Amino acid sequence: MTTLATQTLEAPIVITEPGVWRGRGIGSVLTVTYAEGPVFDIQAPGVTIEGFDIQSAVPRTGPYLDIRHNRVTLRDIFFRGSYVGVNVGSPTCQPAIPRIIDCDFIDPVVAPGAGAISMQNFAGATISRVSICGPGVGTQPDFGIRATRGDTLIISDSNITKHGFGLLGCPPDGAPLTAISASNTFFDSAGLTASGHYGSAVWLVPYGTIQSVKFTGCWLGLSFSWGLLVSPLGSGGAHQIRLGNCDLPGNGLGEVRLAGNCTGVWRDGEVLSPTGQGQY
């Protein structure tokens, strides 16, 4: 185990072997002086990073942490001033079993493409007990959690507030996004995003395919637009979307909107639309 205290970084800390890198919570502040590179350059699987307060002396334009290896765990990290707090994977890199647990994201950069957690590619991912908070008023980042492609994402016991689309599912043409389960999580108060969209609590907008998404005991509320918006584009499709015991109050346009190639959308055991079209 490697323990780090408060310090200012002019270059990333390079990690080349599995192990635990530990700070002292808010007593270990890592301040980066560069806009683009990560705080830790993770070059090995089986790495755990925990107990840090991360911030930047300059406006950020890249992710604070970038996961490209298997079994990387981030725990008890306070992200301040993120452009993207955490990026997982890439179109050609699918890390297995990434975990983001007990992390907080505040005071984000508000710019097109900005968001707290970007799941570009993954297998068996967990996001649990995270708090993502955007600006109190005004324009918001584009997303709280964005899932682009991958298989099996568990989101639980979390709060995403005023951070654009709370959950944005957007696989590109030909890409699959499969098996998302969200439980006991708040997708709250999505507003106008930096890219000019009127936010919904959850937006599933595939050019590729989204298959098997389940919300259990979640709040999808107080957004500018919809609680749940499912609107595949081009040849994209969204199938087997289920809401169970969820609250969708106070959304500007309504609770659920289906448009395009979407089938098997259920709420509390009842199918909403056999044709995948309509407002509810």
Image (cartoon, grey):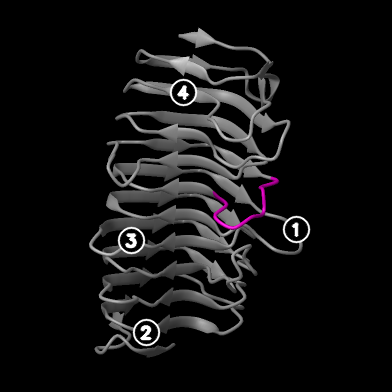
- Can residue 154 be found in the magenta stretch? no
Q: Gap in Å between the C-alphas at discs 4 and 3?
A: 26 Å
The residue closer to the viewer here, 237 or 196, is: 196
Q: Which residue is mark 3?
A: 171
Q: Amino acid at mark 4?
A: Asp
From the image, state whether disc 2 or disc 3 is nearer to you.
3
Q: Amino acid at mark 3?
A: Pro
Does the residue at mark 2 contact the one at mark 3 (Cβ under 8 Å)? no
Q: Gap in Å between the C-alphas at discs 2 and 1?
A: 31 Å
Q: Which residue is mark 4?
A: 41
Q: Position of residue 103 (x, y in %)?
A: 55, 37
The correct choice, above or below, for 16 with respect to 188 in the image is above
Marked residue nearer the N-terminal end (4 or 2): 4
Q: Position of residue 28 (x, y in %)?
A: 66, 19
- Residue 243's mark? none
From the image, state whether disc 1 or disc 4 is nearer to you.
4
Residue reaching furthest to the right = 137
Quadrant for the N terminus, please. top left
How many discs appear? 4
Q: Which residue is mark 2?
A: 259
Q: Gap in Å between the C-alphas at discs 2 and 3?
A: 17 Å
Secondary structure under tag 2 reads: loop
The correct choice, above or below, for 197 with respect to 180 in the image is below
From the image, state whether disc 4 or disc 2 is nearer to you.
4
Q: Which range of residues does the magenta coloring cover?
A: 107-115
